[in-house]
Amino acid sequence: MLALASTVFLYYTIWTLLLPFVDDSHPLQHAFPPRVWAIRIPVILLLLGGAVVAGFLSVVMIRSNRKKALKARQKGGLKGKGKKI
């Protein structure tokens, strides 16, 4: 994982910091996507990551509230069994 992260970091660094100084006709330019994607890809990944985190937190909060509601119903149900409405 460390090797993969280092490779991705090195590739992205070369793409964003060094490629603007290389001539457009140089063959190195063909090894990288257009520079506009250097901004789009991280933004998309951040949005997807935020959506995953928000979804996970929502599921956890919903399950927690269900457990609390079930406990409250069980406690309230035992006390109020003799009442007629």
Image (tube, grey):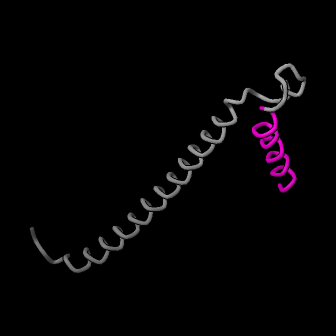
Query: Is 18 within the magenta?
Result: yes
Where the N terminus falls, by quadrant?
Answer: bottom right
User: In the rendered image of this protein, does residue 71 appear above or below residue 9?
Assistant: below
Query: Is 27 within the magenta?
Result: no
> Residue at the location (25% across, 74% down)?
77
User: In the rendered image of this protein, does residue 36 appear above or below residue 12?
Assistant: above
Q: Which residues are magenta?
A: 1-20
Which of these two is toward me, 39 or 51? 39
- On the image, the x and y values in percent for residue 38 come to 69, 36
Which of these two is toward me, 61 or 14? 14
Magenta residues, dominant SS class: helix
Which of these two is toward me, 17 or 44? 17
State the image quarter where residue 76 is shown.
bottom left
> Residue at the location (58% across, 44% down)?
48
- On the image, the x and y values in percent for residue 19 come to 81, 33
Spot the residue most to the left. Answer: 85
